[in-house]
Structure formats: structure tokens, C-alpha cells
């Protein structure tokens, strides 16, 4: 079943849930990626090195597990919908606060707090969507949800292209407050998860806690954290310093950097939608392994293309594979998760992997500096190793393709 056919079979309420979950992750990623476009400018204003500013990305990623745990537990107890609304407002407010940071130290503190809020959104949004749709739609919707991340990066590129030269880096963060408006849509149009409601709704406080539910499953949890470490190395290693690579190594102007970054995200969206849908036919692990290994032939063109056109082709193809693999993640983690902790476990494992991968940007910046600013070599060698590692970890892990949730989501009308 193809992606568009799946969406047509969802009823109106299910489409609204999917849209809200997609937009939540899109706007969360938008707020995260605004910073990656302006690392050199922030460094110049605060008179520090780019590695010091890149440390803020590490802090954001490192704090995301705390947010996944905190907001996930709240969502398992009080419902996905209200906690999602609180979380969106919080990350939007903290994004706006970044615009007024008087020093690098203040910015680091704000970005760490932003990481807590960012860490909460993915797990809640993914569980709300996966619990609200028919099982046969999960693969296609998984690809759509995860590519909210690429769409957020794409929006960041458009804002950088259209506004940066006029409003500067601080103005970019002010624009990042707009996601708070999504709460109005969720409050008016989005119903609660039928699985959570059927399990007792407000009485869910009586359910077993995370520790009790995970008894006998800690090996699964450890595996998921390692798997998500590989995934986060794959994405952050190929994306976070890409604008810096274009500026510092190729000396491209704002427009060229923006258009290449937009091309990156168009490839990511294509890959996520295709591989997410394909995983419904071939299985979750096979789709991930295929995407990871197909990234390898694209690496040389992505990192060493000798012109803007060749770099564009390379970054498009690489991100088809990077985010193609990622497109399977929401459904894969939700199917492996017990019902009682579905808002907590996928997000907590995802962000635990983020914690282990959080030093990616500072490490790659340091690695490039050791080679005289050669970001291309640093990123290419890093991604080649990570792609193979991700394929191996996935291939030897579990899969629960088509797992039945305790209270099955209603079929589309």
C-alpha cells in the first residue's frame, strides 16, 4: 500500500492526529536547527570559537533524555494530548529566550533547558499517532512523522534564506516562538489516544510504573538505546555541521548555503516517506539496513563534490538514505514498546541514544580543525563508519512488525 493510499484510508479524526503529531516534530526540529545555521555568527558576537558554540548542540542533545522521561511519564499517566500541548509551549518559549542571551554561558543554559522540552515531543507525538491509526497504516505514517524532522530543517533553511540577512541570528530565534500557535489547533481538533483512553484514561495512574513494566525487558531497553545512538550519529553527523562546512570550507554565501540545505531536506523527505512505506512490505529491519548501506556510495559525492551541483546531488542522495532509515524509527520503536510505557520507552530510548551521540558536533568540529578545517574528510569518514555500524546493530536486533496494541485503534471509516 503506497503512502497516499494510506492517508486516504484514514478518517478525518485520524488525519488530524497525524497532522498534529507531524507538525509538533516539524516545529520542534525547526527550533533546534535554527542554531546550526548561525554557529559562526554567534561565535563572532561572543568572541569564542565555533567549537564552543557547537557545544550548545551537545547540551541540547544531552538533555533530551530527561525531557523524554519526564514528559513521557506524564503522558502515560495523564494522557498524550494535554502533555503534548504543554511541551510545545515550553520549547517555543525557550527558543524565543535564546534570542535574548547576553552571553555564551546564558545561551548554553537556555539551550540545555530547550533540550529538555525538545526531548519530550517526539515520544508523545509518535505514540499518539501510532495508537490512533490502523496497524496497516503504521509504516507510511511513521515515515511521514519522522520527516517532520527534515521539514523542520527545511523551514529553518527557508527562514535563513529569506530573513537572516535582515534580522540576524537573534531575530531567527524570535521567529522560533511561532510553534506555540500549534497548541490552538491541538486543543480544538485533536482527540486523545484511543489506546490510552481504553486503558482507563485518568485512572491510568494505577498502571504499573516504568520500572515494573520493564522488568525482564532491560536487555531490550539497552539495545534500543544503542540502536538510537547509531541513528543519532547517522543524522547529526551528516546534518548539524553541514551549513558550517559550506560556509567555512567552501565559503558559500547565504543563498547557496540555504539552497543546498533545502536540497538536503528534500532528499530526506523523499527517503523517509519511501522507506517508511516500504517497511510495511519488507519489514522494519530490512528497510533500515538497506537504507544505511545504500548511503555509502553517496558519501564521496556529498563530501567531495567539486561544484555546487555535484554537492547538491550528493547531499540529496545521502539524505534519502539517512532519513530513509530514520523513517522506520517511529513505528519500529512503538511496536517494540509495551502498552503501559509507550509514551515513555520509545522517546526515552531515542533520547538516551541522543545522549550517547551528543558530542558529535563538537567532535567533528575538532576533527576538522585537526586537519586544517577539512570538514569534508571529517564528516565523510565518520558517516561511512556509522552507516556500517547502524546496519549491523539493526540486523542483529529484534522486530515486532505489525504488533497488536492492547486496545486496537479503530479502523478508518
Image (spheres, helix red, strand yellow):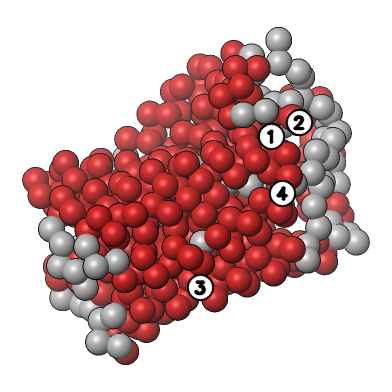
What is the CA distance from the residue labelled 1 to the residue labelled 3?
Answer: 30 Å
Chain-order first, disc 1 or disc 3: 1
What is the CA distance from the residue labelled 2 to the residue labelled 4?
Answer: 14 Å
Residue 332, compared with residue 388, is above or below; it is above
x and y percentages locating residue 140 in the rendered image? 62, 34
Q: Which residue is found at the position 51% from the left and 67% from the top?
A: 296
Chain-order first, disc 3 or disc 2: 2
Whether residue 9 is visible here, answered yes or no, is yes
Residue density around tag 4, few if under 14, some if 14–19, many if 20 or more, within 10 Å: many
In the rendered structure, the answer to whether residue 3 lies left or right of residue 162 reads right
What is the CA distance from the residue labelled 3 to the residue labelled 4?
Answer: 22 Å
Residue 359, compared with residue 31, is above or below; it is below
Residue closest to the eye, 321 or 412? 321
x and y percentages locating residue 389 in the rendered image? 63, 72
Q: Residue furthest right?
A: 216
Element type at marker 2? helix
Which residue is denoted by mark 4 in the rendering?
Answer: 284
Residue 374 location, quadrant: bottom left
Asked whether disc 2 touches disc 1, contact meaning CB atoms under 8 Å apart, the reply is yes
Residue 360 location, quadrant: bottom left
Q: Which residue is found at the position 16% from the left and 41% from the top?
A: 162
Which residue is denoted by mark 2 in the rendering?
Answer: 135
What is the CA distance from the residue labelled 2 to the residue labelled 1?
Answer: 5 Å
Chain-order first, disc 3 or disc 4: 4
Residue 332, compared with residue 370, is above or below; it is above
x and y percentages locating residue 247 in the rendered image? 20, 66
Amino acid at each position: 500500500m503506497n503512502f497516499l493510499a494510506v492517508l486516504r484510508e484514514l478518517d478525518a479524526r485520524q488525519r488530524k492526529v497525524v497532522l498534529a503529531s507531524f507538525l509538533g516534530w516539524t516545529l520542534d526540529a525547526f527550533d533546534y536547527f535554527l542554531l546550526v545555521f548561525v554557529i559562526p555568527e554567534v561565535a563572532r558576537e561572543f568572541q569564542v570559537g565555533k567549537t564552543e558554540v557547537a557545544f550548545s548542540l551537545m547540551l541540547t542533545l544531552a538533555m533530551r533524555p530527561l525531557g523524554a522521561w519526564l514528559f513521557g511519564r506524564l503522558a502515560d499517566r495523564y494522557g498524550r494530548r494535554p502533555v503534548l500541548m504543554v511541551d510545545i509551549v515550553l520549547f517555543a518559549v525557550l527558543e524565543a529566550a535564546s534570542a535574548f542571551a547576553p552571553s555564551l554561558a546564558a545561551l548554553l543554559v537556555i539551550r540545555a533547558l530547550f533540550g529538555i522540552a525538545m526531548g519530550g515531543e517526539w515520544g508523545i507525538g509518535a505514540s499518539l499517532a501510532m495508537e490512533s491509526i490502523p496497524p496497516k497504516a503504521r509504516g507510511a505514517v511513521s515515515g511521514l512523522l519522522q520527516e517532520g524532522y527534515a521539514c523542520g530543517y527545511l523551514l529553518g533553511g527557508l527562514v535563513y534564506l529569506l530573513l537572516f540577512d535582515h534580522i540576524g541570528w537573534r531575530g531567527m530565534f524570535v521567529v522560533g516562538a511561532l510553534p506555540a500557535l500549534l497548541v490552538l489547533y491541538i486543543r480544538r481538533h485533536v482527540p486523545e489516544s484511543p489506546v490510552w483512553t481504553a486503558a482507563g484514561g485518568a485512572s491510568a495512574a494505577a498502571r504499573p510504573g516504568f520500572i515494573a513494566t520493564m522488568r525482564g525487558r532491560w536487555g531490550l531497553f539497552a539495545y534500543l538505546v544503542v540502536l538510537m545512538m547509531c541513528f543519532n550519529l547517522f543524522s547529526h553527523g551528516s546534518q548539524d555541521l553541514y551549513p558550517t562546512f559550506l560556509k567555512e570550507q567552501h565559503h558559500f554565501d547565504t543563498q547557496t548555503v540555504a539552497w543546498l540545505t533545502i536540497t538536503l531536506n528534500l532528499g530526506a523527505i523523499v527517503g523517509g516517506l519511501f522507506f517508511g512505506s516500504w517497511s510495511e512490505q519488507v519489514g522494519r529491519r530490512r528497510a533500515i539496513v538497506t537504507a544505511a548501506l545504500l548511503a555509502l556510495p553517496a558519501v564521496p559525492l556529498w563530501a567531495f563534490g567539486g561544484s555546487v551541483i555535484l554537492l547538491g546531488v550528493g547531499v540529496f542522495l545521502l539524505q534519502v538514505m539517512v532519513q530513509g532509515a530514520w523513517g522506520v524509527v517511529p513505528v519500529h520503536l512503538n511496536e517494540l514498546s509495551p502498552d503501559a510505557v509507550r509514551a515513555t520507552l520509545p522517546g526515552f530510548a531515542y533520547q538516551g541514544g541522543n545522549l550517547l551521540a551528543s558530542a558529535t558536533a563538537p567532535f567533528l568540529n575538532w576533527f576538522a580543525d585537526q586537519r586544517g578545517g577539512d570538514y569534508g574528510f571529517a564528516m565523510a569518514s565518520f558517516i561511512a563508519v556509522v552507516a556500517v555500524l547502524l546496519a549491523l546493530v539493526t540486523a542483529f536486533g529484534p522486530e515486532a512488525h505489525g504488533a497488536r496494541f492492547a486496545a486496537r485503534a479503530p479502523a478508518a471509516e
